Image (cartoon, helix red, strand yellow):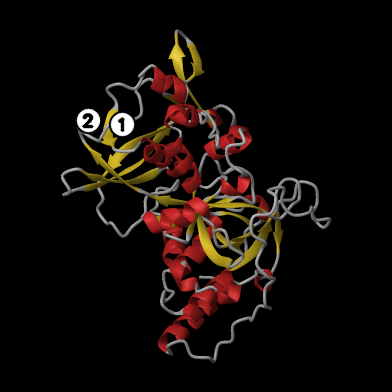
Amino acid sequence: MSFLRSSVLQSLCLLALLGGCRSIQLDQAAPGAGPIAARPPIAGGAPSPALRPGEMLRATSFAALPGWNQDDLRQAWPAFRASCEVLVKKSEWKEPCSVSRDVVATDLKAVRLFFETFMVPHQVFNPDGSDQGLVTGYYEPLLRGARKRGGIYQTPLYRAPDDLLNIDLSAAYPDLKGMRLRGRLIANKVVPYWTRAELTQADLLAGKELLWVDDPIDAFFLQVQGSGRVQLADGKETVRVSYAEQNGYPYRSIGRYLVDLGELTLEQASAQSIKAWYARHPARQQELLNANPSYVFFKEEKLLDPTKGPKGALGLPLTPQRSIAVDAQFLPLGVPVFLSTTQPNSEVALQRLVMAQDTGGAIKSAVRADFFWGFGAAAGELAGRMKQRGMMWLLLPRDASIASAGR
């Protein structure tokens, strides 16, 4: 055990024994800057002249994190401990994750002392040097469905088809880590898989139905969210459907499609407004859905614990309002991230510690996050309206170099 670990552990134990006594002084951060303005143009902040070419992380202090001292870090602790199940396998995370087992989760001072002792915040910058990006929201929806087609249950959710190939390109090309090719085999050639329009128009997925649900637009947004719950018609069972595969095409926003057609303004392009447009235009419904060529396939899981969120990209349950999806090409999965943004359609600050535990087809670039709001209609209302500006700081182990941080 290193001297640092020993001394910190003694301090944490002392805090636990004394019930959070005031004899151990924590660093007091200066008050943060005001909240980021809600929903300005997506271009991001101005490039920072202090950045070196290609630099995307810059070490700073906890005092520089707006709202750090106001966040109740205890609420982030379960999500961090879950991340440690994966992070502890990396050499630079072994010590902090091991020490975290001894921290009293209900002791705010002990939790804060842990992060401020073992971690160094690194501000995240986009490749163009800007320090702001888009923060959206997602959630776990509840749909109504049945195991057999009939009555109102006419929209299928599909299993992954047998002819869909998923090729890990990094096996042959290490520089393409995280990149996968999806397609189908014709003779001895791999060709692109079918688009959404091709799959639906030619009924190419017949026989692969997993469940049937009562609303096509809800089924579409389930694919956008990546997972959800389906309450079966008998009323006795609710199952979870989670992401199984995808057809290989990049996600295209149907909200952007409607904006480009002049059907909605950019400010109106929320999930709620899209659903309202869909209901008003029955003859154009399939046109709208086909604007996104991406198609997601599902697998069924038993809902063993309704209080836990769906599994993210790390195979860990997501924590409502403490998990985010990021672009794994830029940021390491599992790490703590301090997020500074605003509430949906608001200038009220939302500044808190979250964990990068998921990915998403629409999440591209470094300063880009999808905020997991949780399960149900209330979470969906917030997620559907969230389109804010944000800034991000990675919390990395004190001894880890930026070049190898979590990668």
Task: Give the amino acid type for the residue marked by disc 1 in the picture.
Answer: Pro
Image point 38% across, 16% down: which residue?
A: 202
Classify residue 346 as left or right of residue 142: right
Describe the element under mark 1 as helix, strand or loop.
strand
Q: x, y (%) of residue 380?
A: 42, 53
Describe the element under mark 2 as helix, strand or loop.
loop
In the rendered image of this protein, does residue 282 appear above or below residue 341?
A: above
What residue is shown with label 2? 149
Indicate the quadrant where residue 13 lies. bottom left
- Mark 1 Cα-neighbour bin, 10 Å: few <14, some 14–19, many ≥20: many
Q: Earlier in the sequence, mark 2 or mark 1?
A: 2
Q: Nearer the viewer, residue 245 or 283?
A: 283
Residue furthest top as drawn: 187
Label 2 vs label 1: CA separation? 8 Å
In the rendered image of this protein, does residue 133 appear above or below residue 398?
A: above
Classify residue 139 as left or right of residue 401: left
Q: x, y (%) of residue 68?
A: 60, 72
Q: Nearer the viewer, residue 184 or 141?
A: 141
- Mark 2 Cα-neighbour bin, 10 Å: few <14, some 14–19, many ≥20: some
Is residue 404 something one can see in this rendering? Answer: yes
Task: Give the amino acid type for the residue marked by disc 2 in the picture.
Answer: Arg
Image point 32% across, 30% down: which residue?
A: 159
| Tag 2 near tag 1, CB within 8 Å | yes
Is residue 89 something one can see in this rendering? Answer: no
Q: x, y (%) of residue 127?
A: 72, 45
Image point 49% across, 16% down: which residue?
A: 190
In the rendered image of this protein, does residue 390 appear above or below residue 12?
A: above
- Res 156 label: 1
